[in-house]
Amino acid sequence: MLDSLAALFSGSKIAALDIGTSSVKLAEIDMGARGPVLKKFAIYPLTEGMVTSGDITDIGAVSQSISALVKVAKCKRKNVAIALDGSSVIVKKISMPKMDDALVSEQIKWEAEQYIPFDINEISLDHHILKGRASAESMEVLLVAVKQEVLFRAIESVEMGGLKCSLADVAGFALANCFEANYGTSNEAVALLNIGAGVTNFVVVERGEVVFCRDLVVGGDYYTNEIAKIMSVNTGEAEALKISASLGQEAPEDVASIINGANEQVTDEIRNSFEFYAATSAGSPSISRFYVSGGSMYLPGLVEQISKAVGTPFEQLNPFQRVGYDSKTLSPDYISQIQSVCPVALGLAMRKLGDR
């Protein structure tokens, strides 16, 4: 969606790397006769503390994991696209006087000083003009900023892992790319929720454009930490208890109670984002439904509680509704297993297909 956070590759195909809090994922997509086709997908786990709130804190360990992932996936492509999210990424919709597109890049630097809570000299800036939201006098623009140190650490991790970072995108935009590839565009406003371990991506898409994008620094790790704290166990044991409860397996009654309490906190965070969007989007259609993905969507009762709190129906995002996969290398069972955790990587991999 945005092209200047990192230089676009030229020529050879790329792979996508989605570096999350608990794992790093790799995807390769080719264009087939009937549209995009997933050729390879692999996941490699990350241990606690390697990535925090979307920020890579242990470059060496992450780069080793990337190198191991490349071997597991048997990936031959050296150029990769990465996704950025978390507290160091800011996406804000602003209104500007109408001007030629060529002038926006210069003007956006001055606008950023008003809206971005980071030192202007320590960020990388990008923007996207919302084509369907211009009037005779003004236009709306998505202003995107990321801390340079966060971007540089991500690029260094990739290159130490033996790859070349050719493109950097925002995770929420990659999620929207995956949604559009599978569901097309409509005049309705729909929300996308990708609930990960440490970050939840919240995106609103309208008429094929991202009109709102926010990352919430909350996810499945919050539940793990609450279980560890209340039950006086280590995080490994707490994670195992959380997974058992999520799978409907036997677990102490206290675990269910802790998950219910955590659901209330996470739901409040997400409801606040729904309400903020509504308050800042006068004249836009209300969110008609939301699509959910991410490994933490399976936490018992969470998505249902969110739906009730925001008064909006939901369904699970299907990243393979229109995107195909290579049945010679990927089985239907494996596709079912990765369905909830692959949308960002798939959307990122499709950037090379010229989607935006």
Image (tube, rainbow, N blue to C red):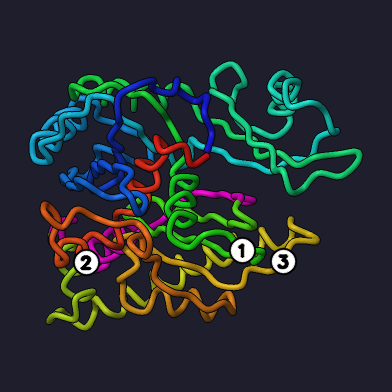
Badge 2 crowding class, 10 Å Cα cut-off, few under 14, some 14 to 19, many 20 or more, is few
Q: Position of residue 59 (x, y in %)?
A: 25, 26
> Extreme front residue here?
33
Element under label 2? Answer: helix
Label 2, on which residue?
336
The reply, left or right, for residue 109 in relation to residue 219 is: right
| Residue of label 1 | 186
Asked if the residue under mark 2 is in contact with the one under mark 3, i.e. CB atoms within 8 Å, the reply is no
Query: For the residues carrying marks 1 and 2, which lies nearer the camera in this image?
Result: 1
Three-letter residue code for mark 2: Ser
Judge whether residue 270 is colored magenta. Answer: no
Q: Amino acid at mark 1?
A: Ser
Category of crowding for the residue at label 1, using alpha-carbon neighbours closer than 10 angstroms: few (below 14), some (14–19), many (at least 20): few
Residue 274 vertical placement versus 211 (above, below): below
Which residue corresponds to mark 3?
285
Residue at image position (52%, 59%) is 184
Sequence-wise, which precedes: disc 3 or disc 1? 1
- Where disc 1 sits, the SS reads loop
In the picture shown, does residue 189 fall above or below 20? below
First of labels 1, 2 by sequence position: 1
| Residue segment shown in magenta | 209-236
